[in-house]
Every structure is written in structure tokens, then in C-alpha cells.
Amino acid sequence: MIVDAWMQHGTVRFLQHEMLDSLWRWIGRKPSDEEVPVDVTVAAMDSGGVDVGLISAWYGPEGDLVSNDEVAGFVAVAPDRLVGVASVDLRKPMEAVRELRRCVNELGFKALRVVPWLWERPPTDRLFYPLYAECVELGIPFCTQVGHTGPLRPSEVGRPIPYIDQVALDFPELVIVGGHIGYPWTEEMVAVCRKHPNVYIDTSAYTVERYPPELVRYMKQRGHKVMFGTNFPMITAERALRGLDDLGLEDGQREAFLAGNAQKVFSL
């Protein structure tokens, strides 16, 4: 089984946003100017052998780019393959908490994702803290990006130390998933992951051939907390997993990476 921990089924307003221009330039493609059918995303999962994909909403200072209700609609098309991940508007803390409750209790979403660079606020900003408390109460993980920012936004807020480390100290019960491996601070991210039992890493936005050596060394340890992700549609699962056999992972390490850790964290 393979679980993709970080995907998007993007709307046109998300895919064509100017902040993503750098990503489309790097991969040599242009975003669609028409809404993409959910079947296209599922077909890409099939091509890469992905059984379940977690697709997230996107909210930023200008509003929603992919709304929670849109994500719920996508999931409804392929409920056996797609799982919803909520996002919220940080500027209105109580409305954000209520919306998160709705997403989990009514829409069946399995996590919250807020991308700090989109808000240009670090994860230790006070506006995040009511959401951390609610994630603990709801029993869901908080997902975020660590590492530099490929889109045209500042990268400082993606540093694992001090930000993720401090949040994990303040909320030891909170399960945190740091997506995009933390590069160029991957060693920091691995250190934070080792230090805190509820901190995990996902490999979204990186192909196997680009995994830093310190991440691969950690994945070869017993009980590693790394899970697979693509950042689809920027990278497909087929491309992201190319060369996995060359890493030399043992069966248990490989299973934890491809599915086991995500099944545990997202209660799949």
C-alpha cells in the first residue's frame, strides 16, 4: 500500500496564482486554465501506485484558493481514494477554530494544514496557538511546510529550529507533520523529529534522487518517522518514487515510509 501525505487537487485560482510561477517554471509546465476533473488526479495516483491521497484546502491572507467545501466535493467523487485536509483563515482565530471543528466533525477531514510562508508568520505566531489546542482536542495532526519556500514568498518561517521545536515543546501532545523535508535545514528537521515523539517528516516536493543523505540515514533507522508525499500536481508519484529500491531500505522501513506512518498519523 502507498499513502501520499501531501497532494492538492487544485482549483484554477490556486494553480494560476502568481506565487506558483517559479514552480511551474522549474518543472517546465503551465497550469491549466480550466478546472481539472478529479479523475485526472486519481489516474495520476494509479500510475504511481498510490492507494490513498490526502488533498488539502489552501487559505491565505487573500482568502481561499481551494476551499474546504471544494475539497469535500473532490473527496465525494472518489471517497475510497481521497482524504480531506482542512485549512483555515488565521486572521479570525475563533472562526478558524469553529471551521476546523466543522471540517473534522461534519466533513470527515483528517488533519489541518496551514502553510506559514503564505501568511508570512512563523508557526510560533500567537494566531496558530488556538488551532494547535483544537487539533489536540480533535485528535488530528497539524501539517505544515518546513524548509525553504519554492513559491515566491519568504523562507525564514520554514526553519525547523527554532519554530517547530518550540511548538513541539509548547504542545507535546500535538502531532506535527513537517512537509518538504526541511531542506536546506533537513538535519535540523531530523534532529527535531528525533527529539519529539510526535513530530514527523514527509517527503513532498522531492524525488527520491534528491533526498539529502541525512534524511536517508534516518530512514534506515528502526522506528523512523518519515512518510511519503508528492506535492502533486507539481510532482507525480511515479516520478517521486523512481529509484526507491536504490535507497536500500529494509522491508519494515520501506513499509513505514510508504504507508505505515501515514496510516497511524492520519488514522486511516
Image (cartoon, rainbow, N blue to C red):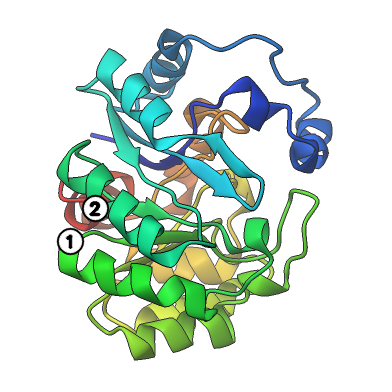
Question: For this rendering, which residue is in front, 173 or 108?
Answer: 108
Question: For this rendering, which residue is in front, 126 or 232?
Answer: 126
Do tag 2 and tag 1 residues touch (Cβ < 8 Å)? yes
- Examine the rendering and report whether any part of residue 92 can be seen: yes
Vertical relation: 73 (above or below) 224: above
Q: Position of residue 268 (x, y in %)?
A: 16, 43
Q: Position of residue 218 (x, y in %)?
A: 42, 71
Vertical relation: 5 (above or below) 31: below
Q: Label 2 belongs to which residue? A: 101
- Examine the rendering and report whether any part of residue 199 can be seen: no
Q: Amino acid at mark 1?
A: Leu
Question: For this rendering, which residue is in front, 107 or 230?
Answer: 107
Which of the two discs, 2 and 1, labels the residue nearer the N terminus?
2
Label 2: element kind: helix
Q: Label 1 belongs to which residue? A: 138
Q: Residue at x 52, y 74 (%)?
A: 123
Is 35 on the left-hand or right-hand side of 224? Answer: right
